[in-house]
Structure formats: structure tokens, C-alpha cells
Image: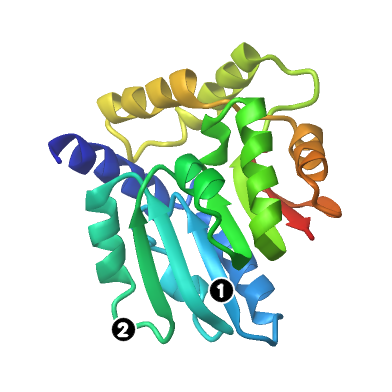
């Protein structure tokens, strides 16, 4: 719990300062869902505390929300953040890969922000294949991107060069914590690769719909 609280506090500073474009991406998700006239079941993969979801799903036709996360403390926060919403809520304490490739919960729209990139390229493909089988409308993911031809080492150098001087709201040890995670756990893909993964998984259409101002994160939509 102590480790979670320390890490989550640091991540919350990043969200609050909007340096990863959480607000813009949340607004895009809201506009996308608002354009759907029919009732929909919504899947939030690695939902964390679902901090943005009350606003993103407000005044949409979402009738059921399912969030999946491995962290029980995060799910307890999610339950509080989603208290009083107009739609049904289910929160699953589970590893999302195991849950989605094994139990096949169906949804109309599936969403994942900043988590699929932790998987190898084969793992990404397998997860997307499972989601293609169980998602009736579309999948959207917001994930880190490399430039075409860029090595992971060059990507990490670029990430540090762009962000370390700008993220003055973090203490030095907090930056070190974040960058250690990025350099040891993150497996970004190029925009071309993210779109090809969706097509290989069986989605009929894959497109990039947003790139953050730093050119480090991209939002992708995959339609059935």
C-alpha cells in the first residue's frame, strides 16, 4: 500500500499538470462517445482510479462500465470516483491480459490509456485479437510512440530531453522513479506499427486520431 501511495501520488502530479495530454484525450473520448446514439457497454482496461471517467462518460449513452485493474487500492479509489454515476459499474481486480484473453467479456467500446505498451509486440497483438473478438464497435488506445526508424535508446534520450527540464513539478527522486519505470517497463511502437497491430488483430480500420504536442504519445482507433 505504501508503494502504491508513493507511486500514485507521483503519477497524479503528472495527470494534474496535464503534461501527457490527459485532458485533450479525455475530451476526444467524450466527443467520440457522445456521437453514439445507442446504449453502449464500455470497457476500461487498466482503469486505475478511473479519475477521468466520470467526466468522459457524462451525458453519453454508456449504460454499463467495466473497469479492470491489478491494483486493489486503485479500484477502491475508482469506486469512489464513480459513485453516483448514472450507469452500472463493475470493477474487476485482475490482470487485464489474463482477464481479457481468458474470460471474454463483451463490450461495445473498449478503451485503454497508457498500459498496452507494457506488452511485447506479440502480447499486444494477442490482446488486440481478443478485443477484436469481443468488442462490437471499436477499440481506442492512447500509448507511447517512437519515430519511424528510432531505436528504444534514442526514444528514451528524446523523452528525457523533452520532459525532464519541463516537469519542474516533480522532485528529482520522483523524476528518477518515473524514468526508471519508462526505461525498464515501456515498449513503445511506431505509429505505423500501432495501426498494423490493429489490422493484424482483425479490425477493419485503424487510424491515428491524435498525437500529443511532444510527439511522444498517440491515440489510435480500431473499428470493427
Q: Which residue is mark 2?
A: 84
Q: Which residue is mark 1?
A: 41
Work out how far the residue at label 2 is from the one at label 1, CA to CA, in angstroms.
Answer: 18 Å
Compared with 150, 21 (above or below) is below
Compared with 66, 114 (above or below) is above
Judge the density around disc 2: few (<14), some (14-19), many (≥20) Cα neighbours within 10 Å: few
Q: Is residue 221 left or right of residue 73?
A: right
Q: Is residue 73 left or right of residue 54?
A: left
Q: Earlier in the sequence, mark 2 or mark 1?
A: 1
Q: Percent position (x, y) of residue 39? A: 61, 84
Q: Is residue 131 left or right of residue 160?
A: right
Compared with 50, 157 (above or below) is above
Q: Percent position (x, y) of residue 141? A: 63, 50
Q: Nearer the viewer, mark 2 or mark 1?
A: 1
Q: Residue at x 52, y 31 (%)?
A: 118
SS assignment at label 2: loop
Q: Percent position (x, y) of residue 41? A: 56, 73
Q: Residue at x 41, y 54 (%)?
A: 68
Q: Residue at x 59, y 66 (%)?
A: 107
Q: Is residue 117 visible?
A: yes
Q: Is residue 37 left or right of residue 203?
A: left
Q: Percent position (x, y) of residue 181? A: 40, 25
- Which quarter of the rendering shows the C terminus? bottom right
Q: Residue at x 65, y 37 (%)?
A: 126
Question: Which label number is shown at residue 60?
Answer: none
Given residues 137 and 34, the one toward you in this image is 137
Q: Is residue 213 visible?
A: no
The residue at the far left in this view is 2
Amino acid at each position: 500500500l505504501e508503494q502504491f501511495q508513493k507511486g500514485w501520488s507521483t503519477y497524479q502530479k503528472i495527470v494534474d499538470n496535464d503534461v501527457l495530454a490527459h485532458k485533450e484525450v479525455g475530451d476526444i473520448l467524450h466527443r467520440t462517445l457522445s456521437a453514439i446514439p445507442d446504449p453502449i457497454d464500455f470497457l476500461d482496461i487498466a482503469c486505475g482510479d478511473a479519475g477521468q471517467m466520470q467526466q468522459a462518460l457524462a451525458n453519453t449513452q454508456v449504460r454499463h462500465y467495466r473497469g479492470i485493474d491489478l491494483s486493489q487500492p486503485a479500484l477502491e479509489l475508482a469506486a469512489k470516483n464513480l459513485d453516483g454515476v448514472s450507469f452500472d459499474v463493475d470493477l474487476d481486480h485482475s490482470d487485464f491480459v489474463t482477464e481479457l484473453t481468458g474470460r471474454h467479456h463483451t463490450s461495445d467500446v473498449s478503451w485503454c490509456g497508457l498500459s498496452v505498451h507494457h506488452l511485447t509486440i506479440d502480447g499486444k497483438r494477442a490482446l488486440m485479437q481478443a478485443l477484436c473478438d469481443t468488442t462490437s464497435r471499436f477499440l481506442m488506445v492512447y500509448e507511447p510512440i517512437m519515430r519511424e526508424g528510432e531505436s528504444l535508446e534514442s526514444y528514451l534520450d528524446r523523452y528525457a530531453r523533452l520532459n525532464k527540464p519541463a516537469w519542474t513539478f516533480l522532485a528529482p527522486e520522483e523524476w528518477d522513479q518515473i524514468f526508471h519505470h519508462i526505461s525498464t517497463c515501456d515498449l513503445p511502437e511506431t505509429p505505423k506499427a500501432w495501426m498494423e497491430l490493429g489490422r493484424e488483430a482483425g479490425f477493419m480500420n485503424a487510424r491515428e486520431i491524435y498525437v500529443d504536442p511532444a510527439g511522444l504519445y498517440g491515440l489510435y482507433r480500431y473499428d470493427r
